[in-house]
Amino acid sequence: MSETLIRIGGVPEHFNLPIHLANEKGLFKAHGISIEWTDFYGGTGQMTKALREDQIDVCLLLTEGIIADIIKGNPSKIISEYVITPLTWGIHTGLDNPLQYKDFTFDKKHAISRFGSGSHLISIVNANSKGHTIRPDQFTVINNLDGALSSLNTLETDVFYWEKYTTKPYVDAGKIRRIGEYLTPWPCFVIAASDKVLKKQADAIDKMLDIIQDSCQQFMHDNDMIPVVSKRYDQQLEDIERWYHSTEWAADSWISDKMIKSVVFHLKAAQIIQQNERIPELIWKR
Protein backbone atom coordinates (compact mmCIF):
# COMPACT_ATOMS: atom_id res chain seq x y z
CA MET A 1 0.00 0.00 0.00
CA SER A 2 1.43 3.39 -0.98
CA GLU A 3 1.78 5.89 1.84
CA THR A 4 0.62 9.51 1.92
CA LEU A 5 3.32 11.81 3.25
CA ILE A 6 2.14 14.49 5.68
CA ARG A 7 4.73 16.98 6.90
CA ILE A 8 3.90 18.07 10.45
CA GLY A 9 5.53 20.78 12.53
CA GLY A 10 5.33 21.67 16.20
CA VAL A 11 7.30 23.05 19.10
CA PRO A 12 9.69 20.59 20.83
CA GLU A 13 7.56 20.54 23.96
CA HIS A 14 5.63 18.00 26.01
CA PHE A 15 2.22 18.99 24.60
CA ASN A 16 3.01 17.12 21.39
CA LEU A 17 4.05 13.81 22.96
CA PRO A 18 0.74 12.02 22.08
CA ILE A 19 1.56 12.50 18.38
CA HIS A 20 5.12 11.25 18.76
CA LEU A 21 3.89 8.20 20.65
CA ALA A 22 1.35 7.41 17.93
CA ASN A 23 4.06 7.72 15.29
CA GLU A 24 6.51 5.56 17.24
CA LYS A 25 3.84 2.85 17.59
CA GLY A 26 3.37 2.84 13.83
CA LEU A 27 -0.28 3.94 14.03
CA PHE A 28 -0.02 6.36 11.13
CA LYS A 29 1.78 3.87 8.90
CA ALA A 30 -0.89 1.26 9.67
CA HIS A 31 -3.35 3.59 7.90
CA GLY A 32 -1.12 4.44 4.96
CA ILE A 33 0.24 7.72 6.32
CA SER A 34 3.91 8.63 6.61
CA ILE A 35 4.61 11.42 9.12
CA GLU A 36 7.58 13.70 8.63
CA TRP A 37 7.99 15.73 11.83
CA THR A 38 9.89 19.03 12.15
CA ASP A 39 10.64 20.76 15.45
CA PHE A 40 10.19 24.53 15.33
CA TYR A 41 12.23 26.13 18.10
CA GLY A 42 11.09 29.57 16.99
CA GLY A 43 7.46 28.80 17.86
CA THR A 44 4.27 29.89 16.16
CA GLY A 45 5.70 32.69 14.02
CA GLN A 46 8.20 30.30 12.48
CA MET A 47 5.45 27.75 11.80
CA THR A 48 3.05 30.20 10.14
CA LYS A 49 5.93 31.20 7.85
CA ALA A 50 6.62 27.54 7.05
CA LEU A 51 2.94 26.99 6.19
CA ARG A 52 2.96 30.00 3.89
CA GLU A 53 6.10 28.78 2.14
CA ASP A 54 4.86 25.18 1.73
CA GLN A 55 7.60 23.77 3.95
CA ILE A 56 5.05 21.88 6.04
CA ASP A 57 1.47 20.69 5.52
CA VAL A 58 0.16 20.65 9.07
CA CYS A 59 1.22 22.28 12.30
CA LEU A 60 0.24 22.46 15.94
CA LEU A 61 0.45 26.03 17.06
CA LEU A 62 -0.97 28.77 19.24
CA THR A 63 -4.61 29.58 18.56
CA GLU A 64 -4.16 33.35 18.46
CA GLY A 65 -1.10 33.12 16.21
CA ILE A 66 -2.66 31.10 13.40
CA ILE A 67 -5.94 33.06 13.52
CA ALA A 68 -4.05 36.33 13.13
CA ASP A 69 -1.93 34.94 10.30
CA ILE A 70 -4.85 33.45 8.34
CA ILE A 71 -6.58 36.84 8.56
CA LYS A 72 -3.37 38.39 7.21
CA GLY A 73 -3.38 36.07 4.19
CA ASN A 74 -1.95 32.70 5.19
CA PRO A 75 -3.62 30.17 2.84
CA SER A 76 -4.47 27.71 5.60
CA LYS A 77 -7.37 26.60 7.81
CA ILE A 78 -7.81 25.47 11.39
CA ILE A 79 -8.80 21.80 11.19
CA SER A 80 -9.20 20.94 14.88
CA GLU A 81 -8.62 22.19 18.37
CA TYR A 82 -5.70 20.36 19.99
CA VAL A 83 -5.04 21.42 23.59
CA ILE A 84 -8.29 22.87 24.86
CA THR A 85 -7.08 24.22 28.20
CA PRO A 86 -5.55 27.72 28.33
CA LEU A 87 -1.79 28.14 28.12
CA THR A 88 0.03 29.38 31.20
CA TRP A 89 2.63 31.87 30.03
CA GLY A 90 5.57 32.52 32.29
CA ILE A 91 6.73 36.16 32.34
CA HIS A 92 10.51 36.23 32.68
CA THR A 93 13.42 38.58 33.17
CA GLY A 94 17.20 38.34 33.56
CA LEU A 95 18.98 37.39 36.76
CA ASP A 96 20.48 40.84 37.31
CA ASN A 97 17.44 42.80 36.19
CA PRO A 98 15.79 44.45 39.23
CA LEU A 99 12.37 44.17 37.57
CA GLN A 100 9.57 42.58 39.61
CA TYR A 101 6.06 41.79 38.38
CA LYS A 102 4.59 44.26 40.84
CA ASP A 103 6.55 46.84 38.87
CA PHE A 104 5.18 48.30 35.66
CA THR A 105 6.42 46.04 32.82
CA PHE A 106 4.64 47.40 29.76
CA ASP A 107 7.14 50.20 29.08
CA LYS A 108 10.08 47.78 29.15
CA LYS A 109 12.00 46.09 26.33
CA HIS A 110 10.33 42.82 25.29
CA ALA A 111 12.13 39.83 23.81
CA ILE A 112 10.07 37.94 21.20
CA SER A 113 10.89 34.90 19.11
CA ARG A 114 9.60 36.75 16.03
CA PHE A 115 6.81 39.13 15.07
CA GLY A 116 3.51 37.26 14.96
CA SER A 117 4.69 34.69 17.51
CA GLY A 118 2.92 33.97 20.77
CA SER A 119 5.62 35.79 22.73
CA HIS A 120 4.80 38.86 20.65
CA LEU A 121 1.00 38.61 20.53
CA ILE A 122 0.40 37.67 24.16
CA SER A 123 2.53 40.47 25.55
CA ILE A 124 0.34 42.89 23.57
CA VAL A 125 -2.90 41.18 24.62
CA ASN A 126 -1.85 41.23 28.28
CA ALA A 127 -0.94 44.91 28.12
CA ASN A 128 -4.17 45.80 26.34
CA SER A 129 -6.27 43.89 28.87
CA LYS A 130 -4.83 46.21 31.54
CA GLY A 131 -5.35 49.38 29.50
CA HIS A 132 -1.78 49.75 28.23
CA THR A 133 0.02 49.50 24.91
CA ILE A 134 3.46 48.29 23.87
CA ARG A 135 5.14 50.16 21.02
CA PRO A 136 6.68 48.23 18.10
CA ASP A 137 10.13 49.63 18.93
CA GLN A 138 9.99 47.95 22.35
CA PHE A 139 10.28 44.50 20.75
CA THR A 140 13.56 42.72 20.01
CA VAL A 141 13.55 39.51 17.94
CA ILE A 142 15.64 36.84 19.68
CA ASN A 143 14.52 33.81 17.56
CA ASN A 144 14.24 31.18 20.31
CA LEU A 145 14.61 30.37 23.99
CA ASP A 146 18.41 30.35 23.87
CA GLY A 147 18.31 33.80 22.32
CA ALA A 148 16.01 34.97 25.10
CA LEU A 149 18.36 33.73 27.84
CA SER A 150 21.23 35.69 26.31
CA SER A 151 19.17 38.81 25.61
CA LEU A 152 17.64 38.97 29.10
CA ASN A 153 20.89 38.34 30.95
CA THR A 154 22.84 40.95 28.99
CA LEU A 155 19.99 43.37 29.77
CA GLU A 156 19.36 43.94 26.07
CA THR A 157 15.73 43.15 26.92
CA ASP A 158 13.72 43.07 30.13
CA VAL A 159 10.68 40.84 29.61
CA PHE A 160 10.03 37.53 27.86
CA TYR A 161 6.81 35.50 27.64
CA TRP A 162 7.12 31.71 27.13
CA GLU A 163 5.24 28.61 28.24
CA LYS A 164 5.73 28.22 31.98
CA TYR A 165 6.73 24.55 32.21
CA THR A 166 9.09 24.71 29.24
CA THR A 167 11.10 27.48 30.90
CA LYS A 168 10.88 26.11 34.44
CA PRO A 169 14.09 24.03 34.22
CA TYR A 170 15.94 27.24 33.34
CA VAL A 171 14.24 29.05 36.23
CA ASP A 172 15.16 26.21 38.61
CA ALA A 173 18.77 26.24 37.37
CA GLY A 174 19.06 29.97 38.07
CA LYS A 175 19.49 30.96 34.42
CA ILE A 176 16.39 33.16 34.26
CA ARG A 177 13.79 34.59 36.66
CA ARG A 178 10.04 34.19 36.39
CA ILE A 179 8.30 37.27 37.75
CA GLY A 180 4.70 36.50 36.84
CA GLU A 181 2.24 34.45 34.81
CA TYR A 182 -0.47 35.13 32.25
CA LEU A 183 -3.31 32.76 31.37
CA THR A 184 -4.71 32.96 27.85
CA PRO A 185 -8.51 33.39 27.77
CA TRP A 186 -8.93 30.64 25.12
CA PRO A 187 -7.73 27.10 24.26
CA CYS A 188 -4.01 27.24 23.73
CA PHE A 189 -3.22 25.02 20.71
CA VAL A 190 -5.03 24.18 17.48
CA ILE A 191 -4.10 22.09 14.46
CA ALA A 192 -3.87 23.95 11.16
CA ALA A 193 -3.26 22.74 7.62
CA SER A 194 -2.48 24.44 4.33
CA ASP A 195 -5.28 24.83 1.80
CA LYS A 196 -3.08 22.92 -0.63
CA VAL A 197 -2.93 19.72 1.44
CA LEU A 198 -6.61 19.99 2.38
CA LYS A 199 -7.51 20.04 -1.29
CA LYS A 200 -5.19 17.19 -2.30
CA GLN A 201 -5.24 14.90 0.73
CA ALA A 202 -8.49 15.53 2.62
CA ASP A 203 -9.10 11.85 3.46
CA ALA A 204 -5.58 11.37 4.79
CA ILE A 205 -5.89 14.52 6.90
CA ASP A 206 -9.14 13.25 8.39
CA LYS A 207 -7.55 9.89 9.22
CA MET A 208 -4.51 11.65 10.69
CA LEU A 209 -6.83 13.62 13.00
CA ASP A 210 -8.58 10.43 14.12
CA ILE A 211 -5.24 8.87 15.05
CA ILE A 212 -4.04 11.99 16.89
CA GLN A 213 -7.28 12.29 18.86
CA ASP A 214 -7.30 8.60 19.80
CA SER A 215 -3.70 8.93 21.00
CA CYS A 216 -4.60 12.03 23.01
CA GLN A 217 -7.51 10.16 24.63
CA GLN A 218 -5.21 7.33 25.69
CA PHE A 219 -2.59 9.78 26.91
CA MET A 220 -5.10 11.66 29.09
CA HIS A 221 -6.28 8.46 30.79
CA ASP A 222 -2.88 6.93 31.49
CA ASN A 223 -1.18 8.31 34.61
CA ASP A 224 1.88 6.22 33.73
CA MET A 225 2.62 8.88 31.13
CA ILE A 226 3.66 11.33 33.87
CA PRO A 227 7.11 9.79 34.52
CA VAL A 228 7.54 9.22 30.77
CA VAL A 229 7.05 12.95 30.10
CA SER A 230 9.29 13.88 33.03
CA LYS A 231 12.18 11.75 31.76
CA ARG A 232 11.73 12.52 28.07
CA TYR A 233 11.58 16.29 28.53
CA ASP A 234 13.99 16.47 31.48
CA GLN A 235 11.53 18.11 33.85
CA GLN A 236 10.80 17.60 37.53
CA LEU A 237 8.24 14.86 38.20
CA GLU A 238 6.10 17.09 40.44
CA ASP A 239 6.01 19.81 37.77
CA ILE A 240 4.88 17.39 35.09
CA GLU A 241 2.30 15.87 37.42
CA ARG A 242 0.83 19.33 38.00
CA TRP A 243 0.92 20.10 34.26
CA TYR A 244 -0.62 16.74 33.29
CA HIS A 245 -3.58 17.17 35.64
CA SER A 246 -4.27 20.71 34.43
CA THR A 247 -4.11 19.97 30.69
CA GLU A 248 -6.81 18.54 28.42
CA TRP A 249 -6.52 17.55 24.77
CA ALA A 250 -9.32 17.61 22.21
CA ALA A 251 -11.07 14.28 21.64
CA ASP A 252 -12.69 15.34 18.35
CA SER A 253 -12.41 17.95 15.60
CA TRP A 254 -15.09 20.29 16.91
CA ILE A 255 -14.04 23.96 16.87
CA SER A 256 -15.92 26.53 18.93
CA ASP A 257 -17.21 29.46 16.87
CA LYS A 258 -17.48 31.46 20.10
CA MET A 259 -13.82 30.80 20.82
CA ILE A 260 -12.86 32.05 17.36
CA LYS A 261 -14.93 35.22 17.87
CA SER A 262 -13.31 35.82 21.26
CA VAL A 263 -9.79 35.54 19.84
CA VAL A 264 -10.66 37.88 16.95
CA PHE A 265 -12.09 40.39 19.44
CA HIS A 266 -8.89 40.38 21.50
CA LEU A 267 -6.70 40.62 18.40
CA LYS A 268 -8.66 43.69 17.29
CA ALA A 269 -8.62 45.21 20.76
CA ALA A 270 -4.85 44.78 20.87
CA GLN A 271 -4.59 46.29 17.34
CA ILE A 272 -2.88 43.16 16.04
CA ILE A 273 -5.53 43.17 13.32
CA GLN A 274 -7.55 46.19 12.24
CA GLN A 275 -11.11 46.86 13.46
CA ASN A 276 -12.44 46.81 9.90
CA GLU A 277 -10.33 43.82 8.82
CA ARG A 278 -12.15 41.34 6.60
CA ILE A 279 -12.30 37.99 8.40
CA PRO A 280 -11.87 35.12 5.92
CA GLU A 281 -13.00 31.55 6.49
CA LEU A 282 -10.83 30.31 9.34
CA ILE A 283 -12.16 26.79 9.82
CA TRP A 284 -11.93 23.85 7.44
CA LYS A 285 -15.39 22.93 6.24
CA ARG A 286 -15.55 19.24 5.32
Image (cartoon, rainbow, N blue to C red):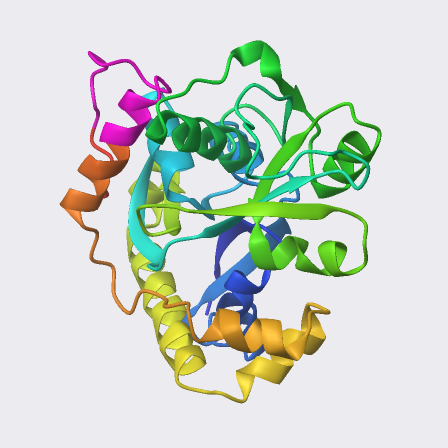
271, above or below 206, in the image: above
Q: Where 92 sits versus 29, above or below? A: above
Relative image position of residue 56 (x, y in whole percent): 52, 41
In this rendering, would 234 be left or right of 275? Answer: right
Picture quadrant of residue 113: top right
245 lies above or below 85 = below
Towards the viewer: 33 or 257: 257
| Residue 110 vs residue 8, the one in the foreground | 110
Q: Residue at x 25, y 59 (%)?
A: 253
Q: Residue at x 55, y 68 (%)?
A: 17
Residue 23 percent location from the top left of the image: 54, 71
Image quarter of residue 130 = top left
The image shows residue 230 at horizontal and vertical percentages of 65, 75
Does residue 220 lie above or below 172 as drawn? Answer: below
* Image position, residue 13 (x, y; %): 60, 58
Q: In the picture provided, is 101 more to the left or to the right than 212?
A: right
Q: Which residues are magenta?
A: 265-280
Q: Is residue 275 magenta?
A: yes
